[in-house]
């Protein structure tokens, strides 16, 4: 069975345009971008594959436009939600989002930093230590622009704060959204992936992800498949053979796929 794959850069990422000053990024904006791509390609129904935040966007698209998504693949990703202990911080998050965007926009009045390719790579690896040098170079091929003096980072600096573009929802909302999904879902989790780093309280994020898994399983039933693979958050780049077969099997058939640990 042959498939036609389209990879897209979200706004502010890769080679896509940045939002104008005063217009911050929101998760729903990316859902809109996916719909625009589908409209341009004249696709009425298709499958979505997303890694990390891309999977979060794919999930949101799947419950807003459920009739358009046949299959959804979450690659070390999860629908993000705001659990009860964090509810008191909701206004703090919203305030910090507004203040952060204004601060970054003030800094963006200055010319972008131009550095050597090697310095850019080392800086990138310092902030993304699990990527590895080979994969880091691949990501920077599209994530930077070459100029006479070196390279510049393409990514919009306003994306630096997670809550600037993540849509935080309650557990009740998450349950309702999952009920709206019509797609079959393949949820691939790396053993040393997303839950192993990124937030101070790992117990909270682990509990959150487990709650998401329970909701997806209880709501979607046989339409939900969960598979663990050995590797970290970038296993799809470092050892693609660990996930390629699982994804292909899922796309090509309706049977349950097996873990390739």
Image: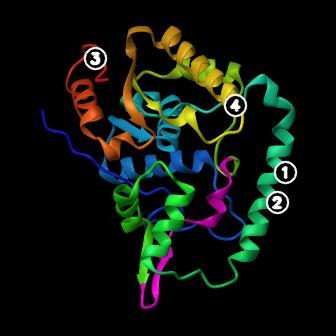
- Give the CA distance from mark 1 to mark 2: 6 Å
- Give the CA distance from mark 3 to mark 4: 31 Å
Determine which of the numbered discs, if any, sits on residue 95 in the image: 1
Magenta-tinted stretch? 147-162
Residue at the image point whose x is 68% and y is 84% from the top: 110
**Res 259 → quadrant:** top left
Which residue was labeled with disc 2? 99
**Vertical order, 138 against 249 (above or below):** below
- CA neighbours of label 2 inside 10 A, class few (<14), some (14 to 19), many (20+): few
Q: Is residue 152 magenta?
A: yes
Determine which of the numbered discs, if any, sits on residue 168 in the image: none
Residue at the image point whose x is 82% and y is 30% from the top: 87
Determine which of the numbered discs, if any, sits on residue 169 in the image: 4
Position of 138 with respect to 64 (left or right) is left
- CA neighbours of label 1 inside 10 A, class few (<14), some (14 to 19), many (20+): few
Position of 102 with respect to 193 (left or right) is right
């Amino acid at each position: 069975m042959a498939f036609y794959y389209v990879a897209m850069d979200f706004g502010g990422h890769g080679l896509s345009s940045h939002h104008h000053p005063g217009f911050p990024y929101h998760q729903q904006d990316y859902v809109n971008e996916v719909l625009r791509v589908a409209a341009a390609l004249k696709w009425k129904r298709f499958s979505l594959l997303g890694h990390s935040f891309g999977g979060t966007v794919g999930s949101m698209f799947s419950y807003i436009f459920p009739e358009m998504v046949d299959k959804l693949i979450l690659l070390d990703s999860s629908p993000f939600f705001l659990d009860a202990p964090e509810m008191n911080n909701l206004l703090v998050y919203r305030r910090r989002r507004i203040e952060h965007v204004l601060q970054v926009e003030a800094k963006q009045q200055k010319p972008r930093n131009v550095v050597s390719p090697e310095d850019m790579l080392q800086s990138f690896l310092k902030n993304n230590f699990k990527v590895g040098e080979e994969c880091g170079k691949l990501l920077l091929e599209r994530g930077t622009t070459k100029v006479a003096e070196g390279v510049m980072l393409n990514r919009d600096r306003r994306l630096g704060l997670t809550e600037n573009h993540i849509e935080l929802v309650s557990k009740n909302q998450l349950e309702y959204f999952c009920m709206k999904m019509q797609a079959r879902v393949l949820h691939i989790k790396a053993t040393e992936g997303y839950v192993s780093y990124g937030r101070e309280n790992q117990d909270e994020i682990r509990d959150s992800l487990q709650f998401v898994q329970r909701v997806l399983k209880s709501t979607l039933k046989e339409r939900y498949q969960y598979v663990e693979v050995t590797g970290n958050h970038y296993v799809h780049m470092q050892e693609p053979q660990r996930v390629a077969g699982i994804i292909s099997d899922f796309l090509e058939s309706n049977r349950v796929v097996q873990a390739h640990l």
